Amino acid sequence: MLLAYLVACVGCFATLDMAERVAHAEKSASQTRWRWVGSGCLAGSIWAMHFVAMLAFQAPIDLYYQLPVTVFSLTIALLAAWLAMHTLSLPDLSLQQCLKASIGIGLGIATMHYVGMTAMHSNAEVYYHPGLFALSIAIAIGAALAALLLAWYLRDGTGMLHQLFKYSASLLLGAGVLSMHLTAMAAFNMVLPGDSLPAQTGEHSHLQLALTVTVIALLIIGSSISAALADKKLQHKDNDLQRVNSLVSQLDQARMSLQQVAHYDPLTNLINRRGFNQIFAEKLMEKTNEGGMLAVMFLDIDHFKRINDSLGHDAGDDLLKVLAQHIKSSIRSHEDVVARFGGDEFCLLINLHDREEARHMAQRIMLKMKEPIELAGRRMVMTTSIGISLFPEDGRTCEELLKNADLALYQSKGSGRNGLNFFSANLKTRAILELQLEEELRHALREDTGLMLYYQPIYDLKTGQVSKLEALIRWQHPVHGLLVPDRFIAIAEANGLIAELDNWVLRKACEDLGELSRKGCEDLRIAVNCSPLNLAREELADEIEYALRVAGVAPNRLELEVTENALMGNIANTLVLLRQIRALGVSLSIDDFGTGYSSLAYLKRLPLNTLKIDRSFIQDIPKATQDMEIVQAIIVMAHTLHLQVVTEGVETFEQYQFLENHGCDFVQGYLLSRPVPLAELHPVLNEINQRKHAYTVTALSLAHGTSALM
């Protein structure tokens, strides 16, 4: 009986192992193979268990077994086992399917048992106890159900705990199968005829046969388990190899993705700066060895920032995609290279035969760029500025050619945009000069040397006195002499020096106001210009307050001049900053009025005190009737908004008289005086202020008739 139990347990363990192999097999042929091996193990173990257990049955009669019936019982066991393995190979197994299959399997095992018992022949009469008979069938079905559920549960697990659970389940299932056999044997009854005699049993021969069957069954089942283990290891190795191959493939994909990210622009799918530089270096080496020309073109989309500011960055990105396709469609795709360097800047590398070929290519691109584009419900036309450098005449290295193309682009943008320029030596000379001026300007600001303020009087037409001065910066350069702002303000704005420069002017003007107060000019005010870039800084109000406090000057003696375009750049933030400055007591003036937006809608919202009419409206008076009408309208409008009016650029007596007659409040220009340094200011102020209001016009005309010619 112990041998029978051992066979049953080993067979159940093999069945669980085969179910696991079926579940993990990837190919259909492998699943079929392991399903049949599992069926054989299960059928063989159950049949061997039954046979060995039957050999343990002892009776005082002669017993023998019919081989065909015994073999037939094995066939029944094989069919039941195949049903079990087929059920376990299903991808999804419901409880209802388990119940149906367990009934079939249980009936199959019971049938195998009772058919096997019919193979046993003797002279005794056989009958079965109905209750125990039914109980044995129920135990068979229950054992089958437990086996299916446990096999389904255990087929996907791994690890030591899983193996221990599988061993425990095998012992339990073996006990269930053996219980069914014992129950069936308990239902089995034999009645000897009255005249028969008990016979001697050959238990030793039965034990030997049982051992033989057990060993054969265990060898067969053990071989199957070994094969399953070997297959499991091979499958693990295959899976490991597949994982390695998958990792290698993923690494290749990651490498390609990184290369794509590293060398291509994700928005336009053009190559980026790094990819361009790599191709450029290869092309340059090729042309250096074999001869030939190359052109490097820098393209910058004109006024692209307006698109982002007005329509949003998403619309800007969509526009860049379209423009990138326009550029790409304008070149020879098999020979030339297009790259996006960032923002709205593109770069082209073109193979050339002569210089004019580069010009024609640039003109073709400019023409293509002017095609109307539908964007965000609008139809717009964009233009581009192009700078071109040539290999080998403009440089022999990547850095030199890119730098020279950039200089040519800068020239195109400075010439009004929507144009192209080739690099020339003059551009390089100017760039070197600007770089030198930038370094020297930094030094001048750091050491506070060379920078100075000149002051131009602003004359009050109603009082006949100079009431204000405009502070104008000058730079006494050690080599180039006295430089006016036009020579270095743009350099300061382009290189982040404008905030420091404006702050220097502010502090110096406040110091000079204190000096003027000590010399008896307590009512004189000074107007200071503010760069558009500086007006965007939130720290400006604090810097003004600090400069006034250190110099000990009343805030109402300082006036800040800002341009229209600077005010309209970001009206919401600008309005907050201007109100902070006005809260300090500082006056605000809008400079160069008429050259920018000239919007009344914005003008009435701004906390301004003064409006300054640009000199371009004055220079042709009295010859230009239209300019005279414009100036009159501006004066009336300003007074309606309770603003004082200053007109700059007054150089003739006729201009002065026209402004006085039409209610202008202040005039400024060479008719009164050129800008002078602080040390020369007092004589000029005394000369102007000593004139009587009654003959101011005549005196100015006579005294400064020659000044207008200077």
Image (spheres, grey):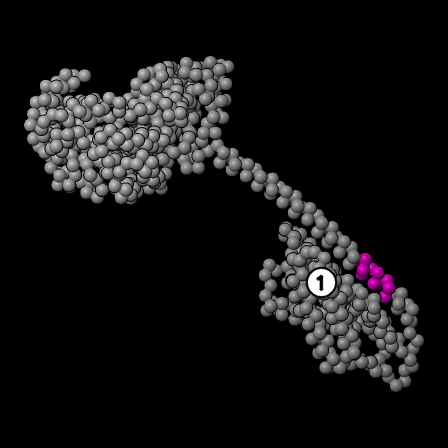
* Quarter where residue 620 is shown: top left
Predominant SS of the magenta segment: helix
Residue type at mark 1: give it. Phe
Residue at x 26%, y 30% (from the top left corner): 518
Question: Is residue 219 on the magenta stretch?
Answer: yes
Q: Is residue 704 left or right of residue 555?
A: left
Q: Quadrant of the C terminus?
A: top left
Q: Nearer the viewer, residue 361 or 67?
A: 361
On screen, 286 above or below 236? Answer: above
Q: Position of residue 360 (x, y in %)?
A: 33, 20
The segment highlighted magenta reads 210-220
Q: Is residue 51 above or below residue 302?
A: below
Viewer-proximal residue among 179 and 671: 671
| Nearest to the observer: residue 599 or residue 639 | 639
Query: What element does badge 1 sit on?
Result: helix
- In the drawing, does residue 554 fall left or right of residue 658? right
Q: Residue shown at 79%/78% (left/top)?
A: 186
The residue shown at (83%, 66%) is 3
Q: Visible in this render: residue 207? A: yes
Does residue 568 appear anywhere in the picture? no
The residue carrying mark 1 is 165
Label 1 Cα crowd, 10 Å radius (few <14 / some 14-19 / many 20+): few
In the rendered structure, does residue 141 fall within the stretch colored magenta?
A: no
Q: Position of residue 490 (x, y in %)?
A: 32, 26
Q: Quadrant of the N terminus?
A: bottom right
Up/down of 245 relative to 228, above or below = above
Please tell me which residue is depicted at 90% across the width and 82% down the height of the picture. 196
